[in-house]
Amino acid sequence: MESGRQQGLRKLVLAIDALLVLGAMPLASWLHELALPVAPFLREKPSFDQYAVLAYLALPLYLSFIWAFGLNRVFERPLGAGALLRDLAKLHLAVLLAFAVLAFLTRSVVNRSLLLGMLGCTFGLLLLERTVLLRWHSFQQQTGQGRARLLVAGAVTPDLLAFVTAAREQPWPPLFVGRVSPEDSPEPGDPSLPARLGAVSELERILHAEAVDQVLFFPPLHIPNLAAPALSVCERLGIPTCFAIPKPRQLEGPARILSLYELPFVSFDAAPKRPELLALKHAFDAVAALVLLLLAFPLLLACALGVLLAMGRPIFYVQERAGLFGRRFRMLKFRTMVSGADQQLEKLATLNEMSGPVFKARDDPRVTRFGRLLRRTSLDELPQLFHVLLGTMSLVGPRPLPSHEQQQIRGWHRRRLSMKPGITGLWQVSGRNEVDFEEWMRLDLSYVDGWSPLLDLRILVKTIPAVLSGRGAR
């Protein structure tokens, strides 16, 4: 669980970054004007419209990428000069590529010299800002002013020992003021432990004598009701508290505290995702799906007309599929099979080339000639962009299986449902039907467990040659 202080510092860094990005624009314009007499190859000073478009797009792009790449976590990890330069170079490359894509999609004219000047100015300003912030934070740590001063309360348990060890191994470790424990708690005499300052009943005296930023309660004081007197002391003195939650050893995901309808809950996520990055993914899905639908509208009409002329009605094949956490939805595809194809499935069971509860056949006799063309080019999947726009699917994610097939999947395979299903994914760019069922499931879980915006971007880039080559498409 992230502390409120960490979240506050991240927001502060984003606010400073926003001011610097805004300041880089007039600075770049001023430098551009100064350079014109000595650099005649530069374009004339851009118009106000060009300047306004650049200013309008730059700020949200910068802040989105800073947030997505975690570059606002300046105070959480010490960075050397090389790592800092690498992170900023990655940020500016992403912004430059985003500008290029936007200019291509909207056919806007962007003054390249002004854009490059702005990128150079933001690079210099952000480098200066982060260098100053890191040095200031390092100074605060060295003098002890910025180090968290923690007091642990509870018996000496494996959880307490593990916490102290992990905390001391952090790049900027906290300072353990000491430890209080129940009166009858045995003392192991371990020199690596924080020094025992007294019993829990003496907590008020200890807090008056020591500078403490936070009190951490461990078993047997990890339940607020059991530590009510000590909790009241901390509240009266204005000192924040935290309660350790013993976690079953077989669970790998970290615990999070949630407030649901004003009641606190402990949440265990199998594959935790940062909510802000998931929100960015969903926003990108909606915008990208809308743009792709507008661009592909003539192609959609051509495919619909082709199906109508080659196979007649219906144009779309509608099938119930399993979505996020098993939600059922009716998925659209362009029809590629003869009418009544689902009723013939049982008779064709011997043709199945895929292990597991799914059906895949290279020479499925139900697929028409025009349908094979649609499948080989993946054009039959185009209507699923409507599902992405409506939020039922994502551009990238595990492939949604028919509900009756998904119901036959048991155990760890079902964890693939913890992400929205996608039009493309690791399975599609890894060979699709050439991959056996177990490897398919492992690819899906690899995506679920290791998801990031960069992974989505890599899959989207790899999808283009996969579609063009038609590898694994049936």
Image (cartoon, rainbow, N blue to C red):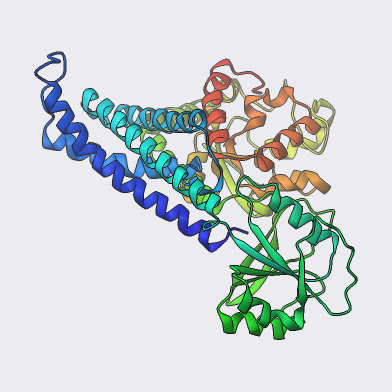
248 sits to left or right of 83: right
Nearest to the observer: residue 209 or residue 172: 209
**In the image, residue 465 above or below residue 275:** above
What residue lies at 63% left-to-right and 35% top-to-bottom?
339
- Return the residue found at the far top: 41
400 or 132, nearer to the observer: 132
Look at 48% across and 40% down and name the residue there: 385
Tell me how many marks there are: 0
Q: Position of residue 467 (x, y in %)?
A: 55, 22
The residue lying at 85 percent from left, 28 percent from top is 350
Q: Quadrant of the N terminus?
A: bottom right
Asked whether, in this view, residue 281 is left or right of residue 28, the answer is right
Please determine whether, in this image, residue 85 is positioned above or below residue 406: above
Residue 266 visible to the viewer: yes
Q: Residue at x 23, y 37 (%)?
A: 25
Q: Is residue 194 above or below residue 116?
A: below
In the image, 105: left or right of 363? left
Quadrant containing the C terminus is top right
- For the residue pair 79 and 325, the one nearer the viewer reads as 79
**Residue 298 placement: quadrant:** top left
Whether residue 410 is visible here, answered yes or no, is no
Q: Where on the picture, by quarter, is residue 230?
A: bottom right
Q: Residue furthest left?
A: 37
| Camera-side residue of 71 and 336 | 71
* Residue 420 position within the rendered picture, expressed as x and y whole percent measured from the top left: 60, 47
Residue 470: percent from left, percent from top: 60, 18
- State the image coordinates of residue 126 (x, y, percent, origin top left): 37, 38
